Each structure stands twice: as C-alpha cells, then as structure tokens.
Image (cartoon, rainbow, N blue to C red):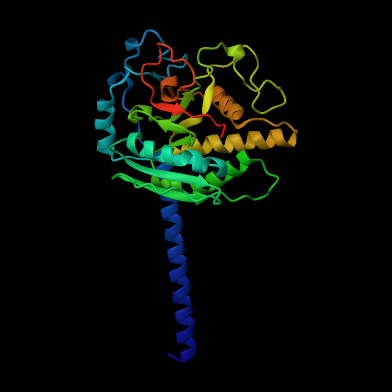
C-alpha cells in the first residue's frame, strides 16, 4: 500500500472516530434529558404522611386538592425514610443583587446550611453580579455550592429578565441534570427552623404572609387587562410570594420560559409589570401541586397570629 493510500485511510479512520464520538455524545445527552424529564422522582402517597384534620383552624387543602403544609399536618420522618432510599439531591438557587450581598448573603447561607434539607445532598447555586466579593462559608457534609456570575446582555434590559435568562441557560445546560428537586429563593430571608422534605413537590408555591388573611379582591394582582399577568377581580386563589418557589427542574424550566415570555410581551406593550405578578398569573393558570403556609416565610415585623405556630423562615426587609 503506497503512502498516499495510507494517508487517505488514516483520514477516513479519523473522520469515522470523530463521527462515532459525536454520535455517542448526542445519544448520552438525549438519554440524560429523557431521564431527567420523564423519569422524575415520584412523591409518596399523601395519606402516608399528611393529615389535613390536624389543623382545623386553617386551610389545609385547596379546591384542586393540593396540600397546604402547616405545622402539625405532616410526618417528616415518613418522608425522610422515603427520599433517603432514593438518594435524591436538592438544589437551592439564590439570586444576590450587588446591594444585597454584604447585607444578607452570609446570614442566608449560614442559616440555610443549618436548616435546609438537613441530611440530604444539597447543591447551593449562587447567582450574583460579580462586582462584590462573596463571603466565605464553610459548608456542612453533603453540601456543596457553585457560583455563577450574572452577565448583562444589554444595559437597557429589565433586571428580572436578565436574571431569569442567565439562570435559564444554566438550568438547561447543567443544573437540571444535577438535582431531583430545585428551590428558587430570595436572599433577604433567614432560616429559623428546619425546612425539610415535606416541602418537596412537582410544583411548590409559597403563600404570601402579607396577604394570606386578606380577600381575593384585595390581592395586588396585575389588574391591567393588556398585561400578560392580568387576573380579573373576583378571580384568583391565593397570593403567592416570589421569595420561595420550587419543584422539579422541568417544572421550573417551564415556569421561567413562560415568565420571560410574559415580561417581554408587557415590555413591548410598554407595561412595566412585576415579576411577582407573572408568578401569580402562572400559578393561577397552572395550579401548584403543593403550597407552603405562611409559617415557611413569615415577616416578623407583623404581630404573629395564633395560626402561625412555627416560623421556618423569617422574611427580611428589602430596605438597606
């Protein structure tokens, strides 16, 4: 075999090797996507761990039969036994604007390390603008954290859209393959007691402490009918807090996709709508499968009513 034919053969073999590696890379990626989106962790039977009759003083079931988690309604040990057999990993995403890092980040991370999903594998995902140095926090066993800078595509783009688009990119590319459940939380809050596996679910919404004891027509829904977040008077279920929401990575991805779409639509119509309004519209149309009571995020500036028996997270003032 002459040298020319040898060279041609080597080139063909190299191309074949590259194509083979590319094929398996695509195949592995698709398999991971299929496993992530179609083989998600199922929740245990509600009757095995939840008893709505234990709290007759509050709403414990919605009209669509989703549980509302209050102190005394759940058996955390049953759930921990169930999820530990599955060896799940839970993600906690926190967005930290520059002005919030110094004031809130250290307390948030220290309290989360102590109280968030104790005994389970946890990955903290910290998104910040990169202009401020993050505080050093030594994590407990089973806990790791990853830091992502928030890149600004354009200075005139709404901050909420920039943040969500940044996060969406990482969620699509990586985060969805690393965790079974994911929570998105605001940095200006402090964990006071354990935030455990009773909060896990396909789609988890947080009831807003400020509005729980108000009527539907008093809720600060978006009332402008041209807005994508519009909810008419006399309609609605609850008012949900932007501080906490969670679910499976797929459900989180669907939510952010819809939210970005809604905010962009309002921007084109010159409507300055709020992120929390779009969150409430999303949960109005797509009912959450689990609701966290105001005990999971209570503002200690308010007088604590008898219904609030166990504050899990204290909401901090955003005024710095």
Numbered disc total: 0
Q: Which residue is depicted at the point 45% across and 29% down?
A: 203
Which one is in front, 8 or 203? Answer: 203
Q: Quadrant of the C terminus?
A: top right
Residue 306 locus on image (x, y percent): 40, 11
Q: Quadrant of residue 51?
A: top left
Q: Among all residues in the image, which is located at the extreme bottom?
A: 2
44 to the left or right of 9? left
Q: Quadrant of residue 234?
A: top right
Q: Is residue 272 above or below residue 172?
A: above
Q: Quadrant of the N terminus?
A: bottom left
Which one is in front, 42 or 7? Answer: 42
33 to the left or right of 228? left
Q: Which residue is depicted at the point 34% across and 28% down?
A: 193
Which one is in front, 170 or 135? Answer: 135
Which one is in front, 233 or 308? Answer: 308
Residue 312 locus on image (x, y percent): 38, 26
Residue 172 locus on image (x, y percent): 50, 47
Q: Is residue 131 above or below residue 226?
A: below
Residue 9 locus on image (x, y percent): 45, 81
The answer, for residue 40, to whether it is visible in the render is no
Q: Quadrant of residue 81?
A: top left
The answer, for residue 86, to whether it is visible in the render is yes
Q: Is residue 264 above or below residue 310?
A: below
Q: Which residue is depicted at the point 31% across and 27% down?
A: 44
219 to the left or right of 121? right
């Amino acid at each position: 075999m002459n040298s020319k034919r040898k060279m041609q053969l080597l080139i063909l073999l190299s191309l074949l090797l590259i194509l083979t590696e590319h094929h398996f890379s695509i195949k592995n990626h698709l398999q991971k996507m299929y496993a992530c989106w179609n083989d998600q962790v199922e929740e245990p039977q509600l009757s095995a761990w939840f008893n709505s009759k234990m709290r007759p003083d509050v709403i414990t079931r919605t009209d669509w039969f989703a549980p509302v988690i209050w102190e005394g309604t759940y058996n955390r040990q049953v759930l921990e036994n169930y999820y530990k057999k599955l060896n799940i990993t839970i993600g906690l995403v926190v967005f930290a604007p520059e002005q919030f890092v110094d004031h809130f980040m250290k307390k948030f991370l220290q309290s989360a390390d102590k109280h968030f999903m104790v005994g389970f594998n946890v990955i903290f995902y910290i998104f910040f603008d990169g202009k401020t140095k993050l505080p050093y926090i030594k994590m407990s066993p089973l806990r790791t954290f990853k830091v992502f800078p928030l890149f600004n595509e354009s200075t005139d783009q709404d901050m909420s859209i920039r943040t969500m688009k940044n996060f969406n990119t990482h969620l699509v590319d990586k985060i969805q393959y690393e965790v079974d459940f994911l929570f998105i939380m605001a940095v200006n809050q402090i964990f006071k007691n354990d935030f455990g596996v009773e909060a896990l679910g396909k789609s988890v919404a947080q009831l807003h402490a400020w509005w729980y004891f108000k009527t539907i027509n008093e809720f600060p829904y978006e009332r402008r009918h041209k807005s994508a977040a519009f909810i008419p008077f006399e309609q609605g279920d609850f008012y949900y807090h932007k501080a906490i929401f969670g679910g499976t990575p797929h459900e989180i991805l669907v939510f952010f996709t819809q939210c970005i779409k809604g905010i962009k639509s309002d921007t084109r119509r010159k409507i300055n709508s709020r992120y929390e309004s779009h969150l409430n519209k999303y949960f109005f149309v797509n009912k959450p499968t689990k609701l966290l009571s105001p005990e999971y995020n209570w503002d200690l500036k308010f007088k604590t009513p008898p219904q609030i028996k166990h504050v899990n997270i204290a909401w901090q003032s955003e005024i710095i």
